[in-house]
Image: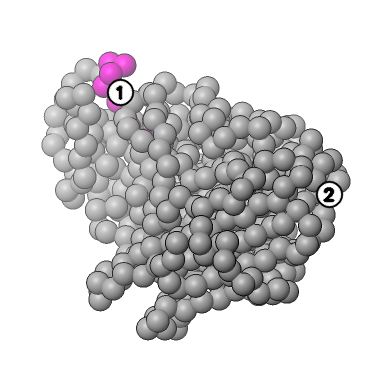
Amino acid sequence: MTISAPAATTASTPPFLVSPSPVSHGLNQAATAAVTTALAGGASTAAFFTTKNQLFYLIQGIQQGTVTWISTTTTDGHPAYFAQLGSGAGAVALTLTAKPNSDALAGKISVEQTQYNGQTYNLVGSVEMSYSAGDYGWTTELFLKVAEQAADVVADQFVEAVTSILQGVKGLFAGIDLAGAADADAGELDAKAVEGTEGEDVIAAYGSFTALAVSSLIMSLVQELLHYTQHSITIINMTGQDVTWATPFLATGTELTLGPIMATGSGTMPTYATNNTIIGAHPVPPAYLGLPQLYGQAEFQFSSATQFTGLGEVFTLGFTDTVSGQAYTATVAFTLPWSGDNLLTATFEQVDPSTFYSTMNWPTGPVLATAYSSDKKYMVTATFDYLSGQHQGPGETGTGFFYNSLIVIQPAA
């Protein structure tokens, strides 16, 4: 790191930048057992989503003032915040932790640099945002990049910057509209959550974490009273490869109400784009300061367009084995008819989604479907929590046609 006085910062050259890590966001590897259990389908899938969706009640408690953010420090003396609902094994918690890299701050190692509006910024650490509920855990890392300047000044600025970021994240969760979540699309939800955060120099880079939160909040009381069907799908990538999802095929009467998005660009006004990549649990490059390896996760919500139609989706998931160079394509299909049981199927073949959906001889009865690649190296599993009936969604006092599904792609051995 160059030891020099910084250029004067202005609104166009802020003293620090924040950006999402390209390699560390998703399901904690410690949650593998919970995912494995959930892949049995039925009640096991329902229990997984019940635990995952406890985030609704934590955010609700923060908004109502029954849960407060507590300021603390790590064992290394760095700033942190946490909010917790309950105690013991049933505790639900959010933690926001500063993770500076001491060698980078001391100028002992070469660090990744970014140019923005003529100013050089150095990657000197991250802020980790984690959510835990029972065996379920989810983490995302936000990179912190500071303007090039003397190392001792950088250390002071790091604390100031992280405190501002943490305050902004606190504002993000306090500002989520629980009641109106089902009426907005993913871009609107993320923009609303980011809007009004503290610290004008903070880049809005919270899209992936907001998607996790909003996936728990999408149930609508108005739709609960009618025969609308809502389908929540979580895709987890447990391979060592990045998986790309193609735009899902939607059966007539099906609407996509939430999908993975990300904040991009630099500055105080973020732009949003669809995030079609679900990261693999591959080793984290040394340049990224030893961030944790995580299983990539993507959240989707679908709804029937009217109270008189069902819905259906076909997902096409592609990836290439980086060792062998072999390309793989998995296809998963769901149908949730207005009348009758829900059905699902999976194949490790590249098919035309529309034809696959319309001509499929759907197997009846199972709550899970599994398919293997032709070389038996990878497998994909899809589940339903329920095949029919009305069920209670997070935060709801009544019941509705709410269904949850997992899609997990992983090594077969």
Identified by mark 1, the residue type is Pro
In the image, what residue occupies the spot 36% across and 35% down?
A: 264
Q: Quadrant of the C terminus?
A: bottom left
Residue position marked by numbered label 2 in the rendering: 399
Instruction: Assign the magenta stretch its main secondary structure.
Output: loop
Could you say which is closer to the camera, residue 227 or residue 236? 227
The local crowd at label 2, few if under 14, some if 14 to 19, many if 20 or more residues have their Cα within 10 Å, is: some
Location of residue 322 in the rendering, given as x and y in whole percent from the top left corner:
27, 69
Asked if residue 225 lies in the magenta stretch, the reply is no
Residue position marked by numbered label 1 in the rendering: 14
Residue stretch in magenta:
10-18
Identified by mark 2, the residue type is Thr
In the image, what residue occupies the spot 48% across and 66% down?
A: 331
Q: How many marks?
A: 2
Q: Of helix, strand and loop, which one carries label 2? A: loop
The local crowd at label 1, few if under 14, some if 14 to 19, many if 20 or more residues have their Cα within 10 Å, is: many
Say which quarter of the image contains residue 152. Answer: top left
Check residue 274 in the rendering and tell me which mark sits there, or answer none.
none
Q: Please identify, in this view, whether the residue under mark 1 or under mark 2 is nearer the observer.
A: 2
Tag 1–tag 2 contact (CB < 8 Å): no
102 left or right of 186 in image: left
Could you say which is closer to the camera, residue 56 or residue 328? 328
In the image, what residue occupies the spot 69% across and 57% down?
A: 336
Going from the N terminus, do you reach mark 1 or mark 2 first?
1
Q: Of helix, strand and loop, which one carries label 1? A: loop
Location of residue 94 in the rendering, given as x and y in whole percent from the top left corner:
59, 46
**How far separated are the C-alphas under marks 1 and 2?**
49 Å
Could you say which is closer to the camera, residue 28 or residue 72? 28
Asked if residue 14 lies in the magenta stretch, the reply is yes
